[in-house]
Amino acid sequence: ANPFEVPEAVVNRSLERLVPGERGADAERIAELRRLARPAVERSVKRALVLQRVAELEGLQPTEAEVEARIEELARRAGRPVAEVRARLERTGQRRALEEQILENKVFAFLASLSEVERGNPRRARGLEA
């Protein structure tokens, strides 16, 4: 593994979204919750940065056609008009999440295509047996 630092501002923004500090909230409790969530948020930010970088290097950004196909699939499954589903995704900000999901799927498919899987004894493949 190659450890790397993540931008503190990105981690802090993610923590603020995860644990909002609303008026009247116990400031110490909010700080404690954010402190407890920090390691998971840092891992999440690192994961997102790595996925984005691999996608950039390998040209794996979701295309408009892929996004549209996924929207059509969602509409078909829900039995709703495509335009209605598209509008709801855009209105709620979920279209961006859909694009990120497609990007993630493409990156993992790419990485899986690079890996070699040895069939046979799984203990040997993991180096647990000589």
Image: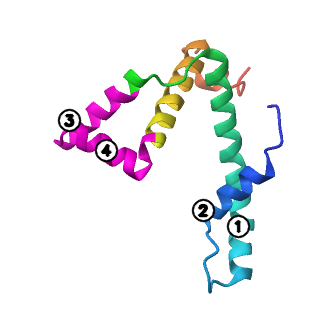
Residue behind mark 3: 76
- The amino acid type of the residue labelled 1 equals Arg
For the rendered model, the colour scheme is rainbow
Are the residues at dot 2 and dot 4 in contact (C-beta closer than 8 Å)?
Answer: no
Q: Residue farthest to the left?
A: 79
* Range of residues picked out in magenta: 67-95
Question: Closer to the N terminus: mark 2 or mark 3?
Answer: 2
- Decide: is 83 above or below 17: above
Does the magenta portion include 28? no
Q: Main secondary structure of the magenta part?
A: helix
**Residue mark closest to the camera, 2 vs 4:** 4
Q: Looking at the rendered structure, which numbered label has been put on residue 87?
A: 4
Expressed as whole percent of the image width and height from the top left, the position of residue 83 reads 24, 38
Residue behind mark 1: 34
- The amino acid type of the residue labelled 3 equals Arg
Q: Looking at the rendered structure, which numbered label has been put on residue 18?
A: 2
Identify which residue is drawn at 68% across, 45% down. Answer: 45
Q: Is residue 115 visible?
A: no
Question: Closer to the N terminus: mark 3 or mark 1?
Answer: 1
**Residue mark closest to the camera, 1 vs 4:** 4
Question: Closer to the N terminus: mark 3 or mark 4?
Answer: 3
- The amino acid type of the residue labelled 4 equals Ala
